[in-house]
């Protein structure tokens, strides 16, 4: 009876947005007469930081300071449509909505600035809240003055709206063919898990997990890391603790109280190491892809692989609870099939019967 | 019954077995303690009773008659965050924020009790009964350790919610 350590890894790919598309997000942006920016979008920030990221996207697209931008997404009655913050779509699709709307606002700012400066819009750029002539930055006008001129001289409201939408991809069931690709972008990730397995109690402890996530472009690395860490611990829960009640979705067998559903707590916290890879997407805002749902997908298989590395058994149903680990260890120690003692040893069997040492033999797991 | 909540003394009219949580939220309109599991399991209702962290959902108000209660509202203000609050802000230790009131009260009590730098194991122990579904706990541990070491920026420099008006002279403005 001892504790065994093992290491396993798993890789995943994960689509951004809804499968088969068809999920719009809208945004409308207007300038106050003092150049401050009001953004109306439907994307709700549930703590993942979409409001921060969208504000960054608008500020960078327009060329104004971050704190000039106010994100108003609080009124579900009047706000622009957003299909929702799910399917890892907040940054990519919601972010594209505010980016496209901001690009239209930027064009209007340059049009008005062009009249004020008497310089062609294509020769102007916006940086730090000022419209500058390319190559001769002493010729400039503040975005605030442009907005003021639009309001009081030209009688215009500088605004722009847009919808980020990839049309629904109809799949021909007979052929599997689609007219447009059914995804917006694919993110990739890997997790390496180090575990310790107690072969007496069946308890598995995750000692360390390394997460490597390709997010296209980390618009806000701190928030990306928050998603990775939160997902990693949720993945640990899916690997070791969390179980939909038996016979789900029948509610008759669900846990009756808070403590009946085990999720990871402070005591389960392993050492975490996170690596962010930027592999830009052609279509995402500033190359961003997704980091959301995907964050908890790689850990359960990595943990299952680490358990196999530690004690040589496959736990084929998640979570790897102590009873399942003990059952797998028992099955390995006392193999039985139909109640009879049957030992399947791949290496031994193949070498015994094969004339070529097992070349060409497709291994199967018992 | 009387309670002193964040320095303000009030006469309590709720029945004596009413959980302190509901007295705070419903009678006194102090809403930072959250009604999570209401079984003592999640920790988000935690308040300080005479400086000690307590689950307000499991505490009958009569049991703390005359006590001094501190909630999140009593440890800092939007313009002047406490070190623990500032560390939570700087380290991104809150996502949805539902668990945060309890986390900050327990962390505040831990740091007050220790009076100096707290170690990782002490944070895990003191916050062990608090449940967070978003952050993965890492940044919460970082924030509490940083706050205990004074490793937070000048909390008065943190951005306040209302941006000041810009100073611009608008050409052609009627003003």
Image (cartoon, helix red, strand yellow):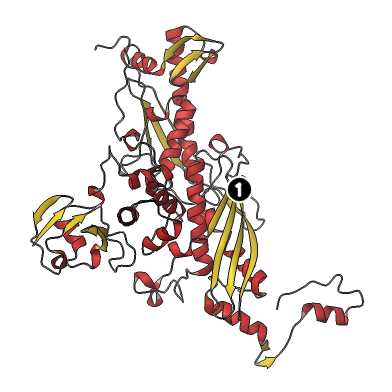
Picture layout, residue A115 above or below residue A72: above
Question: Which quadrant is the C terminus of chain B positioned in?
Answer: top left
Q: Residue furthest top?
A: A118
Q: Secondary structure at mark 1?
A: strand
Q: Position of residue A21 (x, y in %)?
A: 53, 47
Q: Is residue A46 visible?
A: no
Is the N terminus of chain B in the top left, top right, bottom left or bottom right quadrant? bottom left
- Any part of residue B85 in sight: yes
Residue A107 versus residue A117 in the image, above or below: below
Compare residues B143 and A158 and report the one nearer the observer: B143
B15 vs A160: above or below: below
Point out the residue furthest to the bottom here. Answer: A340
Q: Which residue is mark 1?
A: A186
Chain for mark 1?
A
Q: In the image, is residue B123 above or below residue A123?
A: below
Q: Nearer the viewer, residue A76 or A3?
A: A3
The answer to which quarter of the image holds residue A257 is: bottom left
* Residue A84 in the figure: left or right of residue A197: left
How dense is the environment of label 1, judged by Cα within 10 Å: few (below 14), some, or many (20 and up)? Answer: some
Name the residue: 23% across, 63% down: B56
Counting labels gives 1
Could you tell me residue A136's position as x and y percent?
54, 9
Please provide percent x and percent y for residue A270. Answer: 52, 60
């Amino acid at each position: 009876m001892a504790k065994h350590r093992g290491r396993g890894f798993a890789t995943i790919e994960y689509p951004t947005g809804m499968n088969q598309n068809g999920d719009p997000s809208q945004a409308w942006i207007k300038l106050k007469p003092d150049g401050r920016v009001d953004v109306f979008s439907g994307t709700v920030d549930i703590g993942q930081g979409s409001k921060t990221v969208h504000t960054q996207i608008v500020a960078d697209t327009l060329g104004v300071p971050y704190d000039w931008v106010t994100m108003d997404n609080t009124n579900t009655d009047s706000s622009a449509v957003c299909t929702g913050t799910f399917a890892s779509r907040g940054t990519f699709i919601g972010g594209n909505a505010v980016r496209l709307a901001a690009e239209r606002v930027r064009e209007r700012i340059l049009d008005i600035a062009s009249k004020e400066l008497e310089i062609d819009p294509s020769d102007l750029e916006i940086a730090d809240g000022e419209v500058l002539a390319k190559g001769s930055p002493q010729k400039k006008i503040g975005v605030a003055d442009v907005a003021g001129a639009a309001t009081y001289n030209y009688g215009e409201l500088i605004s722009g709206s847009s919808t980020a939408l990839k049309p629904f991809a109809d799949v021909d069931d007979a052929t599997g063919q689609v007219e447009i690709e059914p995804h917006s972008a694919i993110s990739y990730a890997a997790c390496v898990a180090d575990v310790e397995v107690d072969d007496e109690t069946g308890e598995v402890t995750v000692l360390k997990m390394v997460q490597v996530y390709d997010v296209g472009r980390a618009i806000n690395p701190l928030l990306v890391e928050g998603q990775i860490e939160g997902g990693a611990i949720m993945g640990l829960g899916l690997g070791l603790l969390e179980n939909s009640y038996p016979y789900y979705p029948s509610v008759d067998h669900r846990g009756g109280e808070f403590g009946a559903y085990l999720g990871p707590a402070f005591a389960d916290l392993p050492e975490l190491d996170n690596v962010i890879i930027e592999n830009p997407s052609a279509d995402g805002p500033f190359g961003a892809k997704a980091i959301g749902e995907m964050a908890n997908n790689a850990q359960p298989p990595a943990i299952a692989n680490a358990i196999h590395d530690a004690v040589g058994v496959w736990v084929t149903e998640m979570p790897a609870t102590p009873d399942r680990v003990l059952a797998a260890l028992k099955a390995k120690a006392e193999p039985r099939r139909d109640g009879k003692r049957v030992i399947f040893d791949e290496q031994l069997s193949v070498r015994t019967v094969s004339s070529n040492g097992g070349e060409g033999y497709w291994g199967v797991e018992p | 019954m009387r309670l002193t909540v964040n320095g303000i003394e009030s006469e309590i009219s709720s029945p004596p077995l009413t959980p302190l949580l509901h007295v705070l939220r419903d009678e006194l309109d102090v809403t930072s303690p959250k009604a999570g599991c209401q079984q003592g399991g999640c920790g988000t209702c935690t308040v300080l009773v005479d400086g000690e962290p307590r689950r307000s959902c499991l505490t009958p108000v009569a049991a703390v008659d005359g006590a001094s209660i501190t909630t999140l509202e009593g440890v800092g203000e939007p313009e002047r965050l406490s070190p623990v609050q500032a560390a939570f802000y700087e380290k991104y230790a809150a996502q949805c924020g539902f668990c945060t009131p309890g986390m900050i009260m327990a962390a505040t009590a831990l740091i007050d009790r220790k009076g100096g730098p707290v170690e990782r194991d002490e944070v895990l122990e003191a916050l062990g009964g608090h449940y967070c579904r978003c952050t993965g706990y890492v940044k919460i541990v970082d924030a509490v350790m940083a706050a205990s070491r004074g490793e937070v920026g000048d909390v008065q420099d943190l951005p306040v919610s209302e941006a000041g008006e810009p100073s611009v002279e608008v050409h052609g403005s009627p003003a």
